[in-house]
Image (cartoon, coloured by chain):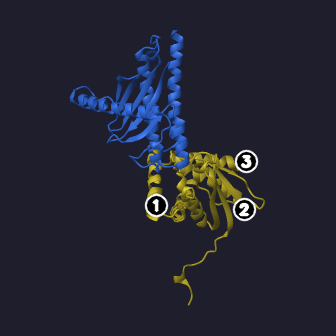
Amino acid sequence: RMAQQKSFQRIGETVWAKMPRLNAEVFTLTYGSLVMQLLKDFDDVNLVNEQLEKMGHNIGVRLVDEFLAKSGIASCSNFRDTADAISKIAFKMFLGITPEVASWNKENNSFSLIFTENPLVDFVELPPKYLDLQYCNVLCGVIKGALEMVQLQVECKFIRDVLKGDDVTELRVELKGMVKNAMSEEYGEN
Amino acid sequence: QIMIVAICIAGKQNEPLYFYCDSATTAKSEFADIHGTEKEALNSFSSSDYLHLQMLSHCCLDLVQEKKTRALMSTSPFEMYMGQLLPIEDYRAYGCYCNTHIKFIVLCDSFGMKSTNVWEVSPTVIDSNMKEAIGAIQAAFVGAMQNPFQPVGCPIVSKKFDNVIHQIVQRFNSIILSTNKRRS
């Protein structure tokens, strides 16, 4: 188990080294202005959270192909491997960070990702009126969308957030089941 | 003992973006916590010192403007840091003017001038440390503006920024104090 984790770490670092670079401030400011614009357009914080997750979902379903191609990972034998792959390879190659996988439940179908650093929230301070805003909700959408494409249905939500005064940001991922491979209605039999 | 008494950040139209004042600073941030609005935070004062220092900083803005136009007319390269602007009442004012028309003014209290003690720290020492301090203030300002929830051109409301400014002031004061001790 440890050997596989180490190999995942190595893969993550190798792929990260080969990825094209983007200035961190440009990235943080872009995401920040995106969130601000959504807040202006939608007024309701819950709608903004929803939009961020939808956007993340769109990103995730496309990003997963790049992940599989660049990392060379074939398939994960269990959900624990999936968690390690997400944390050590996916997050590393796209954001350069490795959130810690922790808090597994008894049935091994639910875990937490603990972020001690996060490029999305550099310099961000949440004003009190936006206390219900899930600033990084796009990440929830990305994980959900990406895993959907490999037939895993998950629910993601933030249960701790540094922007709200906690010492770390914690993202809870829960496996809900396998995605049924349904053909679109065009191919249905009449 | 020389120490920073007030820091003022002014915007393009000389509107106040931030004001730090030694004596009234705790009172100001407490006020902001209760009411949470920027306008009230800036208007709050619990001691006459606060208003007085604001007024002095305002006077310095004129001098900054004057120095800037004079510098632009001369052929030498434009320097952001202006050094000591003028001795004003019991304080000395230092200024910095950025290309984005943001002005930083720092008021320094010199204990030596108020009392009978001869001023022991040389002006060049203060100047170089002040340059460093203003550079740090500028960097902190840039950081505060990177917060997407901080509207541009509005007063800065940020606990993180308050803490950083406080640290810069402490650092400057302790460096000057240690220089003073070494000489005496």
The reply to whether the C-beta atoms of the residues labelled 1 and 2 are less than 8 Å apart is: no
Task: Kindly identify which residue carries mark 1.
Answer: A38
Q: Residue at x 63, y 61 (%)?
A: A156
Q: Chain of mark 3?
A: A
| Amino acid type, mark 3 | Met
Q: Residue at x 57, y 88 (%)?
A: A189
Image position of A32 with respect to B27: above or below? below
Please check whether the numbered discs 3 and 1 fall on a single chain: yes
Mark 2 vs 3, N-terminal side: 3
Separation of disc 3 and disc 1 at Cα? 42 Å
Residue B60, given in percent of the width and then of the height, sits at 34, 30
Separation of disc 1 and disc 2 at Cα? 33 Å
Q: Chain of mark 2?
A: A
Q: Nearer the viewer, residue A63 or B152?
A: B152
Q: Nearer the viewer, residue B41 or A171?
A: B41
Farthest bottom residue?
Answer: A190
Task: Kindly identify which residue carries mark 2.
Answer: A109
Q: Colour of chain A?
A: yellow
Mark 1 vs 2, N-terminal side: 1
Farthest right residue?
Answer: A106
Mark 3 vs 1, N-terminal side: 3
| Amino acid type, mark 2 | Asn
Task: Kindly identify which residue carries mark 3.
Answer: A2
- SS type, badge 3: helix
| Amino acid type, mark 1 | Leu
Judging by colour alone, the chain drawn in blue in this rendered image is B
For discs 3 and 1, the disc positioned in front in the rendered view:
1
Q: Nearer the viewer, residue B28 or B175?
A: B28
Separation of disc 2 and disc 3 at Cα? 19 Å
Residue B43, given in percent of the width and then of the height, sits at 44, 43
Please check whether the numbered discs 1 and 2 fall on a single chain: yes
